[in-house]
Image: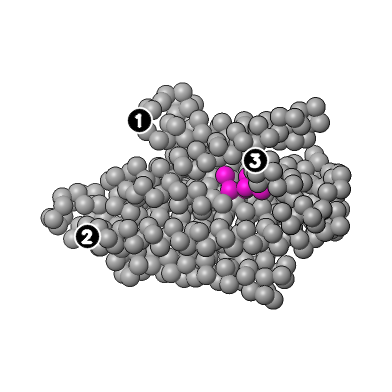
Amino acid sequence: MKKMYFREWAIESPKYWGILAFLGLFIGAAALSVLYMEHEGHYVTGMNNQVVWGTPHVFAVFLIVAASGALNVASIGSVFGVKLYKPLAPLSGLLAIMLLVGGLLVLVLDLGRPDRLLVAMTTYNFKSIFAWNIYLYTGFMVIVAAYLFTMMERKANQYTQQMGLLAFVWRLALTTGTGSIFGFLVARQAYDAAIMAPMFIIMSFSYGLAFFLLMLIYTFKAEGRPLGDMILHRLKNLLGVFIAAVLFFTIVYHLTNLYVTENHALESFILVSGGGYTLAFWVFEVFLGGLLPLAILFHPALGINRNWIVGAALLVLLGGLAKIFVIIIGGQAFPMALFPGQTVIESSFGDGINGQAAQYMASLPEVLLGFGGVALAIAGTLVAVRLLKFLPRALDDESLDTQVAKH
């Protein structure tokens, strides 16, 4: 492989500031939404006593999971020694940090009392996975930042592989911790499953790589930097494998539930009679977010067309949001079995009266807050690549050693 040089993202200033202004609209709308919800109270959201985690939590978990997966490319280069991916490692690490920041910001601003965050960060209940996640999230940012330093500072290059291995292990722990939030929550039938942790890990691989592909293609195309088909086709094939793995884990999750009689009603709700949740599962999660991008990426003609690859990556992200929507909100909407074998006929809290599912409709401030987190992650990445040398000057096929690429 030829010696690789890096430089700042040098698109024209009007275009750069225009992009930031556009993203700033979403960030500003999110800030106004936070003020509105903080001032008026959470009753202005669609959340209630049954659905206590709403749309902001869907975006937050989605971004946190994707952050772990965005580090895929750097891990493949540093930990598994695939030289073809090493020039992409700085962008991979940067995007991982920014996605996590965006997700955590959405989560913190939706807590209702963000001013009491310091209490949450200094008072721990180590029986709760939430307490452990604070260490996992902050530790991830510190480790990946140190990993980036070893990549970008020549004197520290000798430690890159060790830091890459630490970051790889930590990211697995982080996604396991996020999946375990649901896997350990026994009160909800849809959550209480050991497969949640490994399923979240493979989800992170898929969503993070989709984010990375889009950012890579956009930054190179906007500036006119050469991006060869070889590296792009490697990444899109890898994304296809991850999409198939997510579909496989989804099938296993539902077949496992169907094997247990007590979960038949839950599965019927998600797969058949859940209205919007059933629609989100079959149309957005399975078809648009799984089968369709899989068909595009492995199609002999469409799979080598960059526009179709971009479309497939966008569909993966859409399907990812739908999947987490079904898991988080669909899982809460299904009534809890407070008195197994009995029917609740009256409750001042509306706890699944007559077995009815809880109602939830996302409010506009919730949606704006979620998109604000996505916009912040993208804006942060674009500002960083503008100021620092995260991007290789060229990734055309001639710059990469084809003999290395074949192995």
Where residue 390 appears, as percent x and y from the top left, is 77, 43
65 over 359 or under it: above or below: above
To which residue does mark 2 refer? 261
Residue nearer the viewer, 377 or 26: 377
Say the numbered circle drawn on residue 127.
1
Numbered disc in front, either 1 or 2: 2
Q: Are marks 3 and 2 in contact (CB under 8 Å)?
A: no
- The quarter of the picture where the C terminus appears is bottom right
Looking at the rendering, which quadrant does residue 207 occupy?
bottom right
The amino acid beneath tag 3 is Val
Highlighted magenta segment, given as a residue range = 68-74
The kind of secondary structure element at disc 1 is loop
Q: Earlier in the sequence, mark 1 or mark 2?
A: 1
In the image, 315: left or right of 380?
Answer: left
Which residue in the structure is indicated by mark 3?
Answer: 79
Marks 1 and 2 sit apart, C-alpha to C-alpha, by: 30 Å
Who comes first in sequence, dot 3 or dot 1?
3
